[in-house]
Amino acid sequence: MLGGEVRLADLPLREDLVGKFPYGAPQLDVPVQINTNENPFPPSAALVADLTESVARAAVDLNRYPERDAVELRTALADYLTRATGVVLAAENVWAANGSNEILQHLLQAFGGPGRTALGFEPSYSMHPIIATGTRTQWVPCPRRADFTVDVSAAVAEIERARPDVVFVTNPNNPTGGSLPLGDVEALVQAAPGVVVVDEAYAEFSDRPSAIRLIERYPAKLIVSRTMSKAFAFAGGRLGYLAAAPAVIDALLLVRLPYHLSVLTQAAALAALRHADDTLGSVAHLVDERRRVSKSLTDSGFSVVDSDANFVLFGPFADATAAWRAYLDAGVLVRDVGIPHHLRATIGTDADNDHFLSVSERLTDLRE
Ligand code: PMP
C-alpha cells in the first residue's frame, strides 16, 4: 500500500501521544450488537421522510457555508431542554457540535490545555482522559469506591488538593450505570475552583433531576453536556449539545472551527427534534427492559450494578476478556470496558435482550 513502509514509530509524533491507544469499541457485524449504548430502535418512517425532505431542501444551498452559529438548531434544543427539565433556556444557553465528544473537546480547548488539569471519577467515560490528552490537559484520576459510587467527602478533599481547572461528573455514569444525587453534584461544584462538566449523555433514562437546575445558582461554574446519540436514537447523525450560562458559549466560540456543523447535520437534527416525543417514547420501554434484564441476570446468579442508564455492568467473570469472546462466539457483542471481572451490555430490542439473557445463562461456568 502507498506509504505502507512508514510506521507510527517513524513519525515525529508529539511525545505525549507516544504509546497511547485510540478509542476503539469494536465494530463487528454480529446479530446482537449491544456494545455502544445506542438506542436499538431505528428512526420512524415519519422521521426518515421529514429528515430526507429537509436535507433535500438544504442541499439546494450546499454551495454556501452553513449558518455558523446554528441558532435555529440551538433554539430547538433549548426548547427541548426547557420541556424536559422545567428550566427555561434560550438559544444563548445552548451550544451544539458533532456529538458530545466534540462538545467535550471544545470545553477542554477553552478551559483545559497546557498547564491545566482535569479531574474525573474513575471508572468513567474513557473519552474524558483521551480528550484531555489530545488537548494537552493533564488528567487527574480520582477513584470511585469498590461499588463504583463516588465517596463525596473524599472527592471534595481531592478537588481541594488538586485544584483542577475542569471536573467531569458523568451522571448517570458510564460504564457503571449509577447516578450521583443532585445534592452531591452540588457539593462537588461548591468545592471546584474551576468549571464542572456534568456529562448527562444518559439523562433521559434516569428519574433523577438534571443538573441543569443548578446552573442558575452556579452560572460561572456549571456546564451540562447532553447528546442526541442515546435516547434520541441519533448516534449516526452526530449531534451533541450543552446547557450553560451564555458566557460559556462565548468562550467556546473562541475555539470552535468555523462552520463545524454542516448544513446537512443541522437540517437532520432539526428534523429529529421535531419528532422528539415519538422517538423518546422508546425510553420508557428501554427502562422496563433494563429492569427485566437486570432481574433476569440476578436470578441467574450474576451480580448487576444498579443502573440508571440504557446499559448494565455485570459479573463477576473469572476472566472478562474470555467471557467477552464467549459472548461474541454466541453472536452477542458486549463491551469489555477494562474493569476486571465485569462486562457491560446495552439494553437492546426485546429480541436482543432475550438472546443475550439466554447466552448469559449458558455462560454461568465462566463466572468467578
Ligand atoms: N459521554 C458519555 C458518558 C458517553 O457514554 C458517550 C458515548 N458513549 C458520549 C459522551 C459521547 O457520545 P456522542 O459523541 O455520540 O454524543
Image (tube, rainbow, N blue to C red):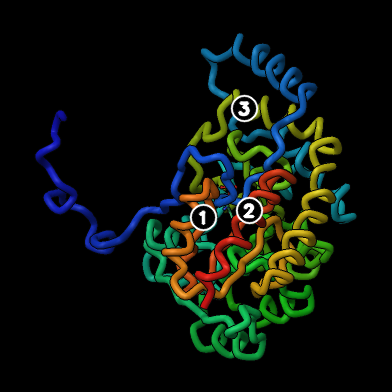
Position of residue 103 measured from the top left corner of the image (x, y, whole percent): 57, 50
Position of residue 84 measured from the top left corner of the image (x, y, whole percent): 85, 51
Dot placed on the residue nearer the N-terminal end, 3 or 2: 3
> Taking 87 as reference, is 159 left or right?
left
> In the rendered structure, which amino acid carries the disc numbered 3?
Glu
Distance (Cα) linking label 1 and label 3: 46 Å
- The answer to whether the beta carbon of the residue marked 3 is less than 8 Å from any atom of ligand 1 is no
- The answer to whether the beta carbon of the residue marked 1 is less than 8 Å from any atom of ligand 1 is no
71 relative to 306, above or below: above
> Taking 261 as reference, is 213 left or right?
right
Secondary structure under badge 1?
A: helix
Where residue 45 sits, quadrant-wise, is top right
Select label 1 or label 3 by which is in front: 1
4 relative to 115, above or below: above
Distance (Cα) linking label 1 and label 2: 8 Å
Dot placed on the residue nearer the N-terminal end, 1 or 2: 1
The numbered mark at residue 356 is 2
Q: Which residue is label 1 attached to? A: 327
